Every structure is written in structure tokens, then in C-alpha cells.
């Protein structure tokens, strides 16, 4: 999914989120960088531009985005939480060499989950790990 939002402030308001400067910059980072960042990644990137920004603010803002369904949590590794503003159904691939996380398009029509018909599904995750194309080429 190509995320392009003209007015981030209006988008946040439409999801019942007060569009503070810090929240808008954090969401803008998510949709423009598409690197499935951690709290630390966003904090390091934005703290020079926003000296009053704290890791706690980044963490709380990302949790608010997840609560309001404009971002999702990605936990491919137990000790690493990443975030994604693409909330459409898709998978992720993590390269074990460069540690980048890539989006993977999933054809949900080909996945048979009929054995779960009697269950309520609240979350879904599809993760792959291996070596990405770029790292394979450089080996």
C-alpha cells in the first residue's frame, strides 16, 4: 500500500487524535520512511528537530496510533517492537543479515482459514525471516 496523506492533522482528527506537532511529526515519519521503525529509531531521527521530544512521548504516541487503528505493532523478534502505518493485511520479511523489515503482499483469498470459522480472530500476523535480495547479491 502506498501511504499518502495530504493533511496529517486532519487525518489524525478524523481518527479522534489531537494533532499536536509531535504526533504529526511521528506519524509523518511512519508514512514517509516506511522502515518499520522502533521507538528508538523514531526518537533518534526526530530528537534533533524536536529537542523537547522524549522516548516516552514517542512510545505513548505510537500506542495511541495502534489503539486508534492507524498503525500496527510488528513483533518479529521477541525483544524488538516495530511499528507500521500500513494497516492493510500484509506480511513482513526480516533480513537476518541487514535487519531491515520489508512488506510482503499477501493474497488473502489463497489462505484457507475455514478451520477457524468458530473462532473470533482479533489479530493476524505473517512473518518470514531469511536473507533479503540485496544482501544475497552482495555476498
Image (cartoon, rainbow, N blue to C red):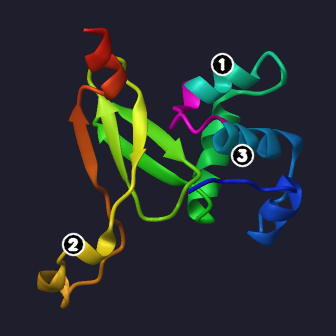
Q: Residues within 10 Å of mark 1 (few under 14, many from 20)?
A: few
Q: What residue do we see at 83% from left, 24% from top?
A: 52
Label 1 to label 3, Cα distance in Å? 15 Å
Measured as percent of width and height from the top left, residue 1 is found at: 56, 57
- Magenta segment main secondary structure: loop
Q: What residue do we see at 85% from left, 56% from top?
A: 6
In the image shown, does 2 or 89 lie closer to the viewer?
A: 2
Classify residue 33 by image quadrant: top right
User: Per the image, is 99 magenta?
Assistant: no
Label 2 to label 1, Cα distance in Å? 39 Å
Q: Residue furthest front?
A: 137
Query: What's the mark number on residue 44?
Result: 1
The kind of secondary structure element at disc 1 is helix
Considering only vertical position in the picture, is 81 above or below 43? below
Kindly indicate whether the residue at mark 3 contacts the one at mark 1 (C-beta within 8 angstroms). no
Q: Earlier in the sequence, mark 3 or mark 2?
A: 3
Can residue 126 be seen here? The reply is: yes
The stretch of residues the image draws in magenta is 33-40
Residue identifier under label 3? 27
Q: What residue do we see at 31% from left, 40% from top?
A: 76
In the figure, is residue 50 to the left or right of 108? right
Q: Residues within 10 Å of mark 2 (few under 14, many from 20)?
A: few
Q: Earlier in the sequence, mark 1 or mark 3?
A: 3
Residue identifier under label 2? 111
* Nearest-to-viewer mark from 2 and 1: 2
Q: Earlier in the sequence, mark 2 or mark 1?
A: 1
Amino acid at each position: 500500500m502506498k501511504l499518502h496523506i495530504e493533511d496529517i492533522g486532519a487525518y489524525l482528527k478524523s481518527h479522534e487524535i489531537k494533532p499536536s506537532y509531535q504526533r504529526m511529526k511521528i506519524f509523518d515519519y511512519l508514512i514517509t520512511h516506511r522502515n518499520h521503525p522502533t521507538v528508538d529509531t523514531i526518537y533518534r531521527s526526530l530528537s534533533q528537530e524536536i529537542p523537547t521530544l522524549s522516548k516516552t512521548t514517542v512510545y505513548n504516541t505510537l500506542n495511541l496510533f495502534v489503539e486508534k487503528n492507524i498503525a500496527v505493532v510488528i513483533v518479529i523478534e521477541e525483544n524488538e517492537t516495530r511499528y507500521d502505518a500500513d494497516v492493510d493485511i500484509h506480511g513482513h520479511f526480516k533480513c537476518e543479515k541487514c535487519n531491515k523489515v520489508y512488506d510482503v503482499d499477501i493474497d488473502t483469498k489463497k489462505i484457507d482459514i475455514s478451520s477457524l470459522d468458530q473462532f473470533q480472530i482479533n489479530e493476524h500476523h505473517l512473518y518470514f525471516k531469511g536473507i533479503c535480495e540485496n544482501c544475497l547479491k552482495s555476498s
